[in-house]
Structure formats: C-alpha cells, structure tokens
Image (cartoon, rainbow, N blue to C red):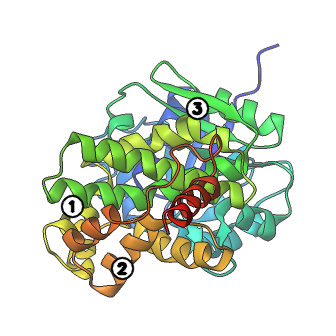
Amino acid sequence: MAEERMRVAVLGGGSFGTALASIAADNGAEVRQWLRDPELAAQINRDHRNGRYLPDYAINPAVVAASDMAEVLPGAGLVLVAIPSQAFREVVRQARPHLNPEQILVSTTKGIQEEGFKLMSQILEEETGFPHIGVISGPNLATEIAQKQLTATVIASADPETRTRVQAALGCDYFRVYASNDRHGVELGGALKNIYAIAAGMAAALGMGENTRSMLMTRALAEMSRFAVDQGANPLTFLGLAGVGDLIVTCSSNLSRNYRVGYALGEGQSLEEAVAALGQVAEGVNTVRLVRDKCREDGVYMPLAEGLYQVLFRGVPAKEMARMLMLGEQSSDVEFILSREDVVNAHRERRGSHE
C-alpha cells in the first residue's frame, strides 16, 4: 500500500518559508502556507510568486496560501514555523487552537526572545506542550535555495520521528537534510552566527583583507561555541552545518541581511539608516544586545559580541572598535584543547618571574 501523502503547513510568508513550502510541494506533499497579508496570499495563489520577498522565484503551483489559520493547520502532519523572532510567540498563540499533539512543530527562525532569553523551540514547547518539536538551521540563503543551488540544512530534535519526517518532507536532489539530536546547539548556532555576519560586513566595508576575514570567522566560531557550551550545548555541533557551515555563508555573502547591515555600518551609516535601507528584519541586531547582556550576566568572555554592541548601541566607530579588539588579550586558540585560563595564568607567572 502506498504511503499516505504528507500534509505540510508553513506559517510565514517570508523568503525561507516560501522556499520550504515549494520544496515540500515539489516532493509531493500537500502544502498550505499561512501569510498575515491576504493580498500576498492571493498573489501566491494567482501568480505562484511572492512578489515581496522572492519576486523571481516560481513557486510550485500546488502550494495554496491563505490568511486564515483554520484553512492551513488542521490535518497537517508537519508544521514549519517561519516567523521573525519578535512575532514568533504571538503567532504560535494564534495557531494553538488549530494544533494537536500529534503534529510535528519545527522552527526555522534564527533568533532569541528577549524575555527569559528564550529560543524559538522553547517557545513552541511552552505554548503547546507538544512532544514533537524540532529546529531547522544551516547555511540556507533563501534566494540560492529558490534558484535550486545545492545546499544542506540540519533538522535537530531529540525525537527521531521529527527528524525522519522532516528529512522525508524536505530532502531532495538540491536540498539535503542532515539530522542532529542537539537541538539547543543547532538553534544557538543559527542565532549566534548573525552577530558575526554583522562584524564581517563591517570588516569588508573597512577594506580588510582575506586574512582578517579568516581570523574573524575563526574567532567567532570559538566565541559561539564557548557561549553555547555555557548554555548546555555540545561543542562538536559547531563543527557541522549549523555552526561553521552557517557562519561561513553569512560572513561571506552580501545576500545575508546581517552582512549588509554590517557593511552599511562600516561605511559610516547609523544603525537606523542601515536597518531602514535593508527593508527586512536583520535578526542579528537584536541578538547582539541580548547575547552581550547574557554573556556579562553569566561571565562568558565574548570580546567580539561586546565590540559589536559598542558599535551598534553606543556609537563607537567601527574602525576604532576593530583597533581595540586587536589590542585585547592573546588567549588560547581552541579552548577545548587549551583553556583560556591556562594561557592567562601562564602570562601571570611569566610577569611574576620578571618582577
């Protein structure tokens, strides 16, 4: 007997949600997409285009869009939540009456809620109490996915059914889906890398070279993993697609919204000017502030995050902050091999022997 056709619901009308909806339809799923804007939903149904976020992308005609959740969620086995972090909880609350515990709920959002420093999958758990919760994260620039360029992502969940169902729904010859059971680490990787994409954009605007970019990304990876381990994640997760993979693409491409904000700041624009010119949400701007406050609260050493905070929210020129970072302490390279404390203590002992 043939396997029953999968039903997939996508909450969100942005570029990534739209691309995932079309991939699932390409794979034979019955797909419904919820958008807040009824006019944009009508355009998708009529023209099979999302003129606001992916105007050049031909959406699979089988995707049916609606602005009423009651038309989208009932009967869906898999629900992908692709909503910006600031509105994430509100939309999940709106969706809750139409959801049931058998459904698989997967966040695709790379951000952090300010109150309680909550990740999106934690919000899904709090608002629903459902057992099948997962996260998608990786080097996934939506415009390249729309062009069907080869890429991969990670589905992270402690629940094997969630992992396998998402792999079946979205895996295809140009979009590979790899599995992880470190949901916290994968989700933190997706949120944290946005910070360092802003730094990479600044460095590019300031004319810094490839050596600088390599140093920046490598030290960013060390800083990300240091913070994530303090939050209970596995450091090895950051060697994968959701860590170093996502970091490389966001720090290297002007398709990245966070990179473009950083580039504008490096050119001397204010934060308000840079965000207004972008016209879309750059999750990294808010994440800089949240992570900087959290690392201070928990005593985690994060000089890049601190430097970016000073540029974004204290008006320090990007060039001046870059100089100050280079004058900071020279610590260990890979802290899981040689701890930062061991290096600091060795310097103290050396200074003591010369006094």
Image vertical order of residue 168 relative to residue 94, above or below:
above
In the rendering, which numbered label is found on residue 263?
A: 1
Q: Can residue 64 be seen in this view?
A: yes
Q: Which of marks 3 and 1 is nearer the N terminus?
A: 3
Q: In this rendering, is residue 136 above or below 192?
A: above
Label 3, secondary structure: give it. Answer: helix
- Position of 68 relative to 1 (above/below): below
Name the mark on residue 310: 2
Crowdedness near tag 1: few (<14), some (14–19) or many (≥20) residues, C-alpha within 10 Å: many
Residue 239, given in percent of the width and then of the height, sits at 57, 35
- List x then y, in percent, for residue 334: 56, 43
Q: How many marks?
A: 3
Residue shown at 32%/51% (left/top)?
256
Closer to us: 309 or 135: 309
Mark 2: which secondary structure? helix
Residue 139: percent from the left, percent from the top? 45, 40
Gap in angstroms between the C-alphas marked 2 and 1: 16 Å
For marks 3 and 1, give the one nearer the viewer: 1
- The dot on residue 29 is none
Spatial distance from mark 3 to mark 1, Cα to Cα? 33 Å
Farthest residue to the top: give it.
Answer: 1
Q: In this view, does 107 lie to the left or right of 83?
A: right
Q: Residue 170 carries which label?
A: 3
